[in-house]
Amino acid sequence: MLLDQGGRTVRRKERVPGMRRELTVDVLVVGLGPAGACAAAAAGRAGLRVLAVDRKAEAGLPVQCAEFVPAMIGQEIGAVGLTRRQSIRSMTTYVEAAGPHIKEHFPGHMIDRAAFDAALVRDAKAAGADCRFGTVLRRLDGCGIAELSRRSVDPSERWTVHARVIIGADGPRSAVGQAIGQVNRELAETRQITVPLLQPFEATDIFLSAGIRGGYAWLFPKGEVANLGLGVEPAARDRLKPLLENLHQRLVSEGRVGSRVLRHTGGAIPVGGMLEPAGRCGETVILLAGDAAGLTNPVTGAGINAAVISGTLAGEAAARICGGDADAAADYAEELRDLLGSSLARALTRRRELMQTYATGGPTPSDLERSWIAFPAYWAA
């Protein structure tokens, strides 16, 4: 029992174990990275009731990204300008011990990814979306009914959410994708450190080597610091740390970066190409966007631009679905294939060609060049 301000006895409201609360919305967005935030904003602008959730406690954190975006995305997304830390003008590629190959015109931006994600979430909230962090999708049943709970409280206390459309933007191991049988089965594992930058430059440095099995290494400048990382196929995961340490020491000895490690990060990247991005759970339409749809480039690992594009299109498709357009989900899938399909298919072909060379002794420098976007051989038939 408690006393109120007037001295009256009041009864404490007790929590009931296993309590369920029901919520009905037009659109449930799972994941509030670039894809999910853009989807929530697009659906919100269309006047829909939107609930968007993310298991993280805060937008964009921890950062699991090399933080480069192509210049063209800045023309569409104002958050790029707000969070840009440095311009990129070219790409320098090192193949084994050979000298640098310079691709002069490769414009882009290095951004603060955490600030970028936070800005996109602010846009979604401004559009009317209810955005909740620290909230987990516990279950999505065959009828499309979602169960959510807060991470910080008793997980038995859940929300049952009924939505006409669910947009899965929950990353490479998407629970929403699993519900419709769409799973990223080919992944790359990455590890990245942030280090002081001693020699400023305006290029993305790429390191290709047969020893970096199924991936490459990068040095991306970001003002006074740089992101130094690499990715490999999962079977070579145990090589991530020594490979990165060796490259770090090499760049320290060259006087390019400092020895101090400021931050660590890493994660999985889908490299198996586009999944089927539309399906159903009962009467609920399911759309996948970003990494959940396998839209990350299988060679470069770039995914922010595809996430922004697909998320926006998914939110717009959700509005048409809620408006009664029976073809909107299929149209969404077709538009993604039109916009991204050929580039993803080429990258997947090049990646698989490269991986096949390991069965016969490993890639030659020519094989490595054919596997990378800076070289004419990559674009040849």
Image: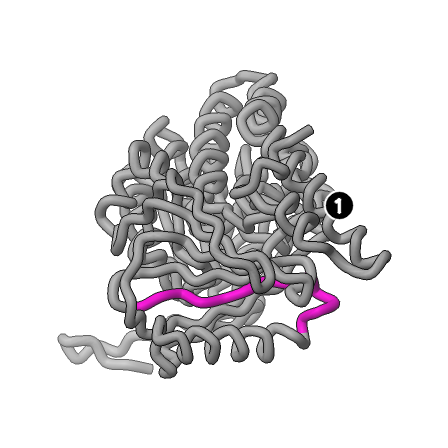
Q: What is the span of residues highlighted in magenta in the rendered image?
A: 225-237
* Quadrant, the N terminus: bottom left
Tell me the residue at 49%/66% (across/down): 229
**Location of the C terminus (image quadrant):** top right
* Residue sticking out furthest to the left: 6
Viewed as shown, does residue 266 lie left or right of 142?
left
Q: Residue at x 29, y 33 (%)?
A: 75
Give the overall secondary structure of the magenta segment: strand
Q: Nearer the viewer, residue 361 or 72?
A: 361
Asked if residue 212 lies left or right of residue 262, the reply is right
Q: Which of 26/223 is in front?
A: 223
In the rendering, at what x and y percent does residue 253 appear? 41, 80
Front-lying residue, 334 or 55: 334
Residue 44 horizontal/vertical position (percent): 36, 34
* Residue at x 48%, y 42% (from the top left corner): 307
In the depicted structure, whether residue 172 falls above or below residue 275: below
Q: Secondary structure at mark 1?
A: helix
User: In the figure, is residue 51 to the left or right of 371?
Assistant: left
Is 232 inside the magenta-drawn segment?
Answer: yes
Please give the count of numbered marks on the rendered protein.
Answer: 1
Q: What amino acid is found at the position of numbered circle 1 in the picture?
A: Glu
* Residue bearing mark 1: 353
Residue 348 visible? The answer is yes
Which of the colour schemes (rainbow, by chain, secondary structure, one colour) is used? Answer: one colour
Residue 173 lies, with reference to residue 80, above or below; the image says below
Q: Is residue 292 visible?
A: no
Residue 364 rendering spot, x and y as whole percentages? 71, 55
- Residue 265's spot in the image, x, y percent? 47, 70
